[in-house]
Amino acid sequence: MTQQLGILERRRIEAEILKPVYEEMVARFGEQVAQEVLGTAVSKAAVAAAENFAKAEPNGTSIETFAGIMPLWQKDDALRMEVKRQDETHFDFDVKRCRYAEMYREMGLGHIGHLLSCNRDAAFCTGYDPKLKMTRTQTIMQGADHCDFRYTYEDDKS
């Protein structure tokens, strides 16, 4: 199903379900607690999803296999990326357009878009392969003109 349905569409469906749940949590527990709960739940879901992707790799995970699944996040012109570096230990790119951010804003969820989407990225690395590390200093979701993704695959021998 994941290959047929792009991640952007999945996130839209999830957001439609989560929006009233989030609003109810805010009403009952306050915005801070609601955001903490949502952020934690989405991060755990990202780890679980990544573990499933990792299990599907017949020869194990690597930065190369990780880069190979990126088209799922790009499907439907969801991300416009500029690759800066790609080799056996690095996958660096900038996102110049993020339709995830655009979609969350259109849905009235821009203020929690980082919880619904951006916070998944580092958590995904944890589930996919603990040797995969991500750094990012800015996101379109939070107002920057681009997102700067820097992935490093750390060898145990280092």
Image: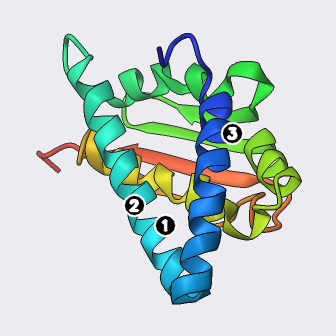
In the figure, is residue 75 to the left or right of 2? right
- Circle 2 packing at 10 Å, graded few (<14), some (14-19), many (20+), is few
Can the viewer see residue 136 in this picture?
A: no
Numbered disc 3: secondary structure: helix
Q: Nearer the viewer, residue 78 or 94?
A: 78
How many angstroms separate mark 2 from mark 1 (CA)?
5 Å
- Circle 1 packing at 10 Å, graded few (<14), some (14-19), many (20+), is some
Q: Mark 2 and 1 residues: CB-CB less than 8 Å, in contact?
A: yes
Residue under label 2: 41
Q: Which mark is residue 38?
A: 1
Residue 141 % position (x, y): 75, 60
Residue 17 % position (x, y): 60, 48
Can the viewer see residue 28 in this picture?
A: yes
Q: Nearer the viewer, residue 26 or 88?
A: 26
Residue 126 % position (x, y): 29, 50
Q: Which mark is residue 154?
A: none
How many angstroms separate mark 3 from mark 1 (CA)?
16 Å
Residue 89 % position (x, y): 37, 36
Give the amino acid at mark 1.
Leu
Q: Looking at the picture, does residue 81 appear above or below residue 140?
A: above
Numbered disc 2: secondary structure: helix
